[in-house]
Structures are given as C-alpha cells and as structure tokens.
Amino acid sequence: MNRDTLEKKLEREKQKNEILENMIEGKTRNIYFEKEKFREQSEFLKKVIDSVPHPFFVVNADDYSIIMANSSTHAGTSSKKIHCYEVMHHKTAPCINEGYLCPLAEVKRTKKPVTVEHVHSDIPNNTRLIQVFGYPILDNNGDVAQMIEYTMDITEQKESLDRFKAMTENTSDWIWEVDENAAYTYASPRVKDLLGYEPEELIGRTLFDLMPPEEAERVAKEFGRIAKDGMPFSRLENTNLHKDGHHVVLETSGVPILDANKHLRGYRGIDRDITVRKEIEERNRCQLQRLTALRKIDMTITASLDQHVTLNVIINEVIGQLKVDAADILLYKPVLQTLEYAAGSGFRTQALQYSRLKVGESYAGQAASERCVVHIPDLHKADGFRRSVYMTEENFISYYGVPLIAKGNVTGVLEVFHRSALEPDDEWLGFLESLAGQAAIAIDSAALFEGMQRSNLALITAYDATIEGWSRALDLRDKETEGHSHRVTELTVRIAHAMGIRGAEQVHIRRGALLHDIGKMGIPDRILLKPGPLNEEEWEIMRKHPVFAYEMLSPIDYLRPALDIPYCHHEKMDGTGYPRGLKGEQIPLSARIFAVVDILDALSSDRPYRPAWPNEKVLEHIRSLTGGHLDPNVVETFLENEKDLLSLPVLCYSKA
C-alpha cells in the first residue's frame, strides 16, 4: 500500500471518527435536553399536584407503592418505598381488606375509572365521609401500569345535601325545575300529595300539561312574558289538574336559570297549595255579593213604590247570585185561590207569563199550600210540572219552589229553574230562602202601600169635597158672587199651569183658590150683605177677612200649604194692599196669580149695581193695573194665553 493510499485511508477514518464524535455529542445533548424537559415538566406537574387541596397520588399497579404524591397525603419526601394503604384510608393491603371496596383494586380489575364513598374515622368521635376517585394509566399493551387516586372529604357537602333533600322532601310546598321549554327536569316528592303524581312521572312533561286548556293558554302567555323579562316572579296563581281530575289551585314563585351568557335555560320554582284559601276567599266574596244583593233589594223596596220594579230587581238577583238559568214570582190571589205570574226572567218562551195555578195543584201550588220548599231534581222524571205544552221547549231539569210568607200569610211563590242538575250547599239554600223572604216583604209592602194609597185617595176626596162644600156655602151666603169661587179656581189653576207650576203645588193653589174668601165667614151679615156702599168702619172690618182666613186654616196641617191665596190675595205689588202691606215678590206667586183672576172675574160678572164690563175694557183695565197692583209677569202670561184660557166651557163670562 503506498503512502498516498494510506494517508487517504487515515483521513477517511478521521472523518468517520469526527462524525461519530459529533453524533455522540449531539445525542448526549439531546438526552440532556430531554432530561431537562422531563425535569421541568415533572416539577410543573408536582406544583400542580401540590396545589390540589385534597390527597392526590400516583400508585404503581404491581405493589400499590406511591410513585408521586402531593403534600396532602403526608407521605413526605422519604426515599423509602411507601404503599398507599399506609398513608390513606385503607390501613391494610387492598387485596386483604375484607368488606371494603378499594377503588385502586377495582381500577386494576376493570381498567376503568371508579368512584366510591366510605365512612372514615381517624380519631374517636370524628367520623368523616370520604369520596375516592380512581383512574387507570395504561401501557402500550393496554394493561394497567399505574393508577391515580384522588380523595375528597365530602362530609359538609353531604350534610348540606341531606339538609336540602330533607327540606325539599318534607316541606309542605312542591319544589320543581323546568328547562327552557317548561318541561320538568326535577320534581320534589311533595308533588305526590299536591297533584297525585310520582316525581318521575312528571319528568319530560311541561307545566301546561297539568292544567285545563284555558288555564294552560293563560299561563303560557304569562310565562312568555316572564321568559322575555328574565326576571324572578312570585305568587302567580294557576289552576292545575290533580291526577284524579279535580282542580287544585297553586301559587307559584320562581327564578330564572341562566347560562354564562345570560341566556335563559329554564326555571326553578316552588308551588304552594292555596285551594282551601281560594275557596274561603270565594265563599267570602260570594257572601259579600249576596249581602250586597240583599241590601240592594232592601233599598229598592224602600225607595220604589212600583211593585213590578221591585220584583224584577229580586228576580235579577236570584239569577245572578244563585247562578241559575231562570226564575219567576207568582202572586197569590186570595179571592180566586190562585197563583198568577207577576215577574220573571231567563225563559225562552212566554209560556209561564200566562200561568194561573190553583193552590194545592202543581209544584208551586204545593209550595204555597204546604208552606214548604219544593225541590224537583229532574223535571223530566216528574209528573207534577204541567204548565203548558210550550214548557217542553225550555228544557229545564232542576226546580225549586219557595213559598213567600209575610206576617204569617202566603203572598206568592218564588220559582227557580235550571237547565242542568243543581247540587246546592246549605249557604245556597239559605240565600234562596232569604231572597224569598225579601220578595215576600216587597209584595206585602206593595200591598200595604196600595191600601194606604186607596185610603189616602178616599181621605183626599173627602177633604176636597168638604172644601168645595165650604166654597159653595160661601157662594150661597153671598148671592151676588154665586159661582165666583168655582170660576176663579179653574182659571187660577190654568194660569199657574201656563207658568210651569205642576204637581202638589198646583193642588194647593186649587184648594187656596176655593177657600180664598173663607175668612168672610167671620164678617157679620150686616156688612157682608149690605146693599149699599160700606163706610170706613165697615171697610176696616171687611179688610180683616184674610186674617180671619189665616186664623181659621192655619191650625189644619192639611190646609196650611193652601194659605197663600186666602191670606195674601188682596196684597198689591206696590205695597198698598192688605192685610200686611207686602210688596213685589214678598207676595206669594199663587196670590199674585189669583189677584189677576179675581179682578177679571169681578169685572166680567153682572152685579145688581152694574152690568158686566165688555171683555176689551176688562183687559185694558188689567193692563192699567200692571206694576202697581198686579204682577207684570202674571199679566203677560194671561194676556198671551187669554183666548185659550177663557174659551174652556167651565168659565161662563159675559162677553157683551
């Protein structure tokens, strides 16, 4: 081998050695870097594990020795091999610890994560509930090489959970949770007592599935508004259906369940059974309405003199308060011994309006004759209800007939009809009888008032006849004025009517006009019937007749409102009249009206000492007295209506 060849060979070997050295050096560096990286990762993992507040360690699957542990395990940093059961909850090897399910042994057997709970007592009287989690670490062959064990003391959480569970299961309220579609995801056991369902029966069903259709629609709208607002709600009343079908009223309060983005995910709520409370409220409301109805009827009886109005008010309250379809009142006619229709409402036909029943016949007649309530649950199965062939069109089922009794006497019968079966309680029946009592009082009051009206009418007729008798007596005493009282009375009333006076005031004017000269009964005949002129002394006596009228009539209450004309018809607008010298509107209007009529009649009538004046002359004279003697307004009214007022046949004036 020559020198060049050898040198080349040595150079190649040197290059190979350099390459090999570089490879070894690089591999060494990689190993170093890998070790550094592993060390850094291990230190980071150690820090993470040490930050866990509960015992956490990695165990060799072969002998259960601890490979890595955090400070909470109290394993320390000893290099001595320590087994997990020496520092943890199981004090003997898992394979021989009978009666205890070791999570690591179970992980090793199943190769799956395992969670167990057990009671641990490290010192006397200090029992704790421990929750242990075991996780497998598999090698490339799928065998368990290592295992992780993590333990937590859940004593407080368990106690809180138990307290919450006891509260939810023993509270009288029902606690629930629904998702965003209002479907139940949780229901406490109390739902069994409230609605008859087991909690698991509600899971997946919605709030609205447990409600009547109309209520479900209403509550769905309410929940739509609640979902839009995303706010808690309280005391939302809703009617639910019990499993057996009856209604249960619940009062619901709830809060929204929101996710991290504040999106609604459902609601948690609590329901309270308020059925009894609502029933009490409804009874109280019903009682108040019924008391109000009785008060309304009582006020109507007091205020109205029309029996028909009062009975219709009673009928309306019967139908409205008792929730029945129809009702009527039949009045008892003692002379004919019959019951006749007086008022009713709710009927489809007019058949009952022509009812005339004999007492003792039919159900109404039975109620009247026996003085007891007659109840027929189903008219279709009874024979006694035969009013009219048209009654079949009414389709009534239930019937009540209640006698109306006032002061021991039957005044009629209240009948109640319903087109379905009635199941009334004692309060309903009691109120029916109360309404019947009010109806009896109304009928009796109307009859009493009618009787009083008849008596008053007879008395008034007698009074007026007496007054007219006095008036005729005065006319007979003074032959010159015969018929005068009747004429002036008629015309005075007509002018008063033309001036807008109506009613009782007009009646008092009529009586006052008839008695305008009643005071002349106190004037001696020598003065009253003197054929010639009166002297001053005689005139002084004559001018006292208004005072005599006042003294005669004022003690009579019935005639006191009629005193204005007898006492004031000689007063004048300018104050020169007698007996008191009243002026202007101090003189009662009725007396001012009569003053015009009195002059008109005196001048229009024949007298022994002069004939009647012509009509135009009379009217001209009356115009001349306007403002001084007579009221201008009265004169104007008379003159505007003179032809109509004087054309009536009662007035007989000379028209010469």
Image (tube, rainbow, N blue to C red):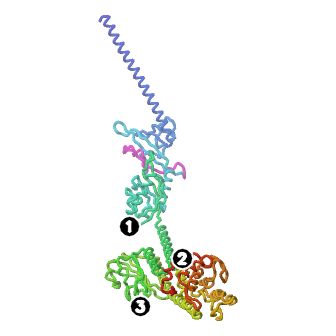
Q: Which residue is drawn at 45% across and 47% down?
A: 262
Residue 392 appears in the figure: yes
- On the image, numbered disc 1 is attached to which residue? 245
Could you tell whether 25 is left or right of 573 in the image?
left
Name the quarter where the N terminus is drawn: top left
Q: Which amino acid does label 3 sit on?
A: Gln
User: Within 10 Å of the Cα at label 2, are there few (<14), some (14-19), or many (20+) other Cα atoms?
Assistant: some
Tell which of 252 and 586 is nearer to you.
586
Q: Which of marks 2 and 3 is nearer the N terminus?
A: 3
**Cα–Cα gap, marks 1 and 2:** 81 Å
- On the image, numbered disc 3 is attached to which residue? 337
Question: For the residues carrying marks 3 and 1, which lies nearer the camera in this image?
Answer: 3
Q: What residue type is labelled 2?
A: Thr
Could you tell me if the residues under marks 2 and 3 are in contact, i.e. CB atoms within 8 Å? no
Q: Earlier in the sequence, mark 1 or mark 2?
A: 1
Could you tell whether 528 is left or right of 247 in the image?
right
Q: Earlier in the sequence, mark 3 or mark 1?
A: 1
Q: What stretch is highlighted in magenta?
A: 100-125
Name the disc covering residue 637, or none.
2
x and y percentages locating residue 387 in the rendered image? 35, 84
**Cα–Cα gap, marks 3 and 1:** 51 Å
Residue at the farthest right position: 537
Name the disc covering residue 191, or none.
none
